[in-house]
Image: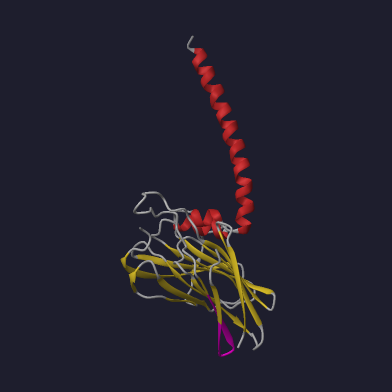
Amino acid sequence: MTHTPRRTFLKSGLALGLVSAAAAAGLLKPARVLAAEWPKGAFESKKLEEAIQNLFGSAQATASGSIRIKAPLQAENGAVVPIAVTADLPNVQSIALLVEKNAQPLIANVNLSGAEGYFSARMKMNATSDVHVIVKSAGKLYSARQNIKVTVGGCGG
Amino acid sequence: MARQTRIRTKPQEGVTEVLVLVSHPMETGQRTDPKTKEKIPAHFIQKMTFTLNGKEIAVADLGIAVSKDPLVAIRVKGAKPGDKVKVAWSDNQGESGSEETTVG
């Protein structure tokens, strides 16, 4: 008698495993197709490292003094924080902006194919946080950061 | 609904800055309507493609944390007066827009 529940348990467990494997395979494919279009996984990542990993396939970035961040040290309105990034590195392929303490850290990523190593935008910040810039130059990742103090957060209603 | 897209170029010392401003709500999908208490669906620009004389020079992927009415700028070297700069954008709800200007 004691064997029957155990058998059923094992069987159901196996079936569950198969279903989730199938679901994973089925679900991952469209996600990958989308990634080539718009990096959904990276934008939906909740953690900084996870977002960088998702976007570049690696979270190893060397701190670089050649990346200049022009942003206020203190922002009164977190809904509109201007930022401009200049990367004085050879062959800049992309520039990504991330705010560490946002629910979804990745703000934007620009892929450059002829334009200079420069990108500027205005972003929303939930709270005082470090802003990270990741620059891909000649296949390598470089980073820079700056703390921005936010008086009123810009992510809530 | 057509949204206003504006593009402007600013040449300085051999480098031309391309500024783009789109009137767009950039709704995060995390806000609730204070009256109905219902979630406001996400509505934001995902892609902005910049071209110079028809050649793609930069593609920006934007997320929900880019501010309302996004103002985005890139720089390009060697653009001459008369060159055509174009931006095309598309959002997560299938809306799109584009605007073209001539480097002055």
User: Is residue B104 in view from this perspective?
Assistant: yes
- Pick out the residue farthest to the front: B1
Dividing the image into 4 quarters, which one contains the C terminus of chain A? bottom left
Q: How is the image coloured?
A: secondary structure
Q: Residue furthest top?
A: A1
Query: Measured from the top left, where is residue A13 in percent x and y?
Result: 54, 26
Boundaries of the magenta span:
B9-20
Residue, far left: A151
Q: Nearer the viewer, residue A46 or A67?
A: A46
Name the foreground residue: A49 vs B25: B25
Camera-side residue of A64 and B55: B55
- The location of residue A91, given as percent across then percent down, is 61, 75
The image shows residue B92 at horizontal and vertical percentages of 55, 57
Identify the residue shown where x is 60% and y is 45%.
Answer: A28
Q: Is residue B89 visible?
A: no
Does residue B12 show up magenta in the picture?
A: yes
| Number of numbered labels in the structure image | 0
The reply, left or right, for residue A105 in relation to residue B56 is left
Magenta stretch contains residue A106 = no
Q: Is residue B27 above or below residue B74?
A: above
Q: Residue furthest bottom?
A: B13
Residue B17's place in the image compared with B91, above or below, is: below
Relative side of B28 to B7, left or right: left
Q: Position of residue A154 (x, y in %)?
A: 36, 63
